[in-house]
């Protein structure tokens, strides 16, 4: 017997039967199960949810399977048309699942999920996302920088090892030729002959109760560098003021020497003079002495990287930048400088940032600890938001404003282990109401299913009220 379709209508019915078939449903479920298992393995192997999302969950394979699932669900409903009353639970379940999938897509495409880091006493409005971007800035007058290249990149999926990113600039082509997703980073300060970079010093500030041994590097000649140290602060490259009502030290390069000035909190100028390498001065701050260990009139930061097998709090990612004879690894968030006869360029590989739409000022941060330990148990951020005023954000009390929800996520510490900033998780889920609606419809379908089964069982039972054997 020949069951092949003979007319276009028969062909359409045959095709619809296949799309609504159990075979296709089993294939889709099996494929989704395999991808989910692979994604779980990838996330556990790299300790990175974003790696699993980029390598598995947001790939064409997953999108094709989800599209086939939607087609299968719709085809099954069409195949049962015209629907009868007994089909309401079946139709509700399918419509609810379709709404869940659609709501998830809306959230993925138009939602917001990132972090807002706010230093204590400061304000912030720029949300850092997991997406990454590559930007090149240029200045032709040494003052104003303009964006000459910008592109969102996913180097974990589209590795520059296979296809390098080439960016034309004057006098050559800038190339991104390699990428490492997880590296331990460390840097060292070295001297350079380039006059376009600022100075760097290594100093030792100490007394019988405290000791600070660190570098202070002025990366840009237009912006002074500073290092706050509790009640005192050291500046490098800033003009020395006539008066300052704070415990501050100013260091200004003068060739091979540094001109210095030390101020007390009462505005008094305590010390002023010049200092060379290996020389020491008495600051007058609680017996603190300042020794200049190393001084470079012009310096640069050299990054060194060690491969890491998986993500941790100490790892970052890095790109390999090439321009003529200059070749260097650049860490996430750092900048690579290139100088030509016509311009200066800054290459920046960083997380994408978006505007929150309003300022959030962090006035106070509180951290509760487990009894008898230094482990953090609870966090609280006290903030000020325009139109809302003073607000509190804690681990169980988010802040909602203008469609955004701000959760207390964590905090960051300075070099001394003191809390320096609060980390808030920012979420905007435009597909939430669609997913809620889908869940509600599925629940109604379950209720109808049990109701119809109970009603059917009663209809099939003994009509005289007796029980059969």
Image: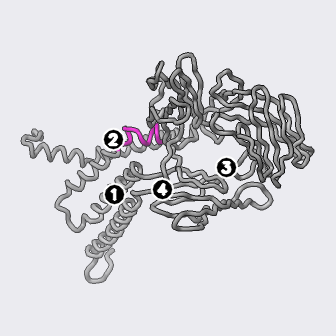
Residue on which the image places disc 4 = 357
From mark 3 to mark 2, how far is it between C-alphas? 40 Å
How many angstroms separate mark 4 from mark 3 (CA)?
23 Å
Inspect this view and state whether residue 378 appears. no
Residue range in magenta is 53-65
Q: CA distance from mark 1 to mark 4?
A: 29 Å
Q: Which residue is mark 1?
A: 99
Residue annotated with mark 2: 64
Question: Residue drawn at (26%, 73%), measured in percent from left and top?
Answer: 460
Location of the C terminus (image quadrant): bottom left
Comes first in the chain, label 4 or label 3? 4
What residue is drawn where x is 80% and y is 49%? 247
Comparing marks 4 and 2, which lies closer to the viewer? 4
Image location of residue 3, percent across then percent down: 12, 41
Q: Secondary structure at mark 1?
A: helix
Of the two numbered discs 2 and 1 on the same chain, state the one appearing first in sequence: 2
């Amino acid at each position: 017997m020949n069951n092949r379709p003979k007319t276009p209508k028969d062909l359409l019915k045959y095709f619809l039967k296949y799309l609504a078939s159990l075979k296709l449903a089993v294939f889709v479920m099996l494929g989704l199960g395999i991808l989910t298992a692979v994604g779980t393995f990838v996330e556990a192997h790299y300790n990175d949810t974003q790696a699993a999302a980029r390598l598995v969950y947001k790939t064409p394979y997953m999108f094709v399977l989800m599209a086939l699932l939607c087609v299968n669900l719709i085809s099954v409903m069409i195949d049962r048309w015209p629907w009868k009353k007994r089909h309401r639970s079946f139709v509700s379940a399918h419509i609810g699942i379709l709404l869940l999938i659609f709501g998830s897509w809306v959230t993925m495409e138009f939602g917001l999920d990132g972090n807002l880091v706010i230093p204590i006493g400061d304000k912030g409005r720029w949300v850092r996302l997991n997406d990454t971007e590559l930007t090149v800035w240029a200045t032709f007058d040494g003052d104003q920088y303009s964006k000459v290249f910008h592109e969102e990149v996913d180097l974990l999926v589209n590795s520059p090892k296979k296809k390098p990113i080439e960016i034309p600039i004057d006098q050559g082509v800038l190339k991104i030729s390699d990428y490492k997703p997880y590296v331990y980073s460390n840097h060292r300060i070295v001297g350079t002959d380039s006059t376009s970079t600022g100075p760097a010093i290594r100093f030792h500030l100490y007394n019988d109760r405290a000791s600070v041994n660190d570098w202070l590097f002025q990366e840009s000649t237009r912006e002074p560098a500073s290092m706050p140290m509790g009640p005192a602060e050291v500046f490098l490259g800033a003009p020395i003021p006539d008066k300052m009502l704070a415990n501050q030290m100013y260091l200004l390069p003068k060739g091979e020497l540094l001109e210095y000035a030390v101020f007390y909190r009462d505005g008094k100028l305590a010390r002023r003079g010049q200092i060379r390498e290996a020389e020491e001065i008495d600051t007058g701050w609680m017996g603190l002495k300042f020794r200049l260990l190393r001084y470079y009139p012009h310096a640069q930061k050299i990054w060194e990287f060690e491969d890491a097998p998986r993500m941790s709090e100490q790892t970052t990612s890095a790109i390999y930048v090439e321009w003529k004879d200059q070749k260097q690894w650049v860490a996430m968030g750092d900048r690579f400088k290139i100088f030509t006869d016509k311009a200066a360029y800054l290459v920046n590989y960083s997380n994408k940032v978006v505007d929150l739409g309003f300022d959030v000022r962090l006035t106070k941060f509180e951290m509760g600890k487990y009894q008898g330990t230094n482990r953090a148990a609870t966090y609280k951020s006290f903030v000020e938001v325009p139109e809302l005023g003073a607000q509190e954000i804690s681990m169980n009390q988010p802040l909602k404003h203008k469609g955004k929800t701000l959760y207390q996520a964590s905090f960051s510490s300075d070099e001394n282990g003191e809390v320096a900033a609060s980390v808030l998780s920012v979420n905007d889920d435009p597909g939430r109401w669609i997913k809620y609606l889908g869940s509600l419809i599925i629940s109604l379908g379950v209720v109808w299913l049990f109701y119809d089964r109970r009603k059917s069982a009663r209809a099939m039972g003994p009509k005289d009220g007796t029980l059969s054997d």
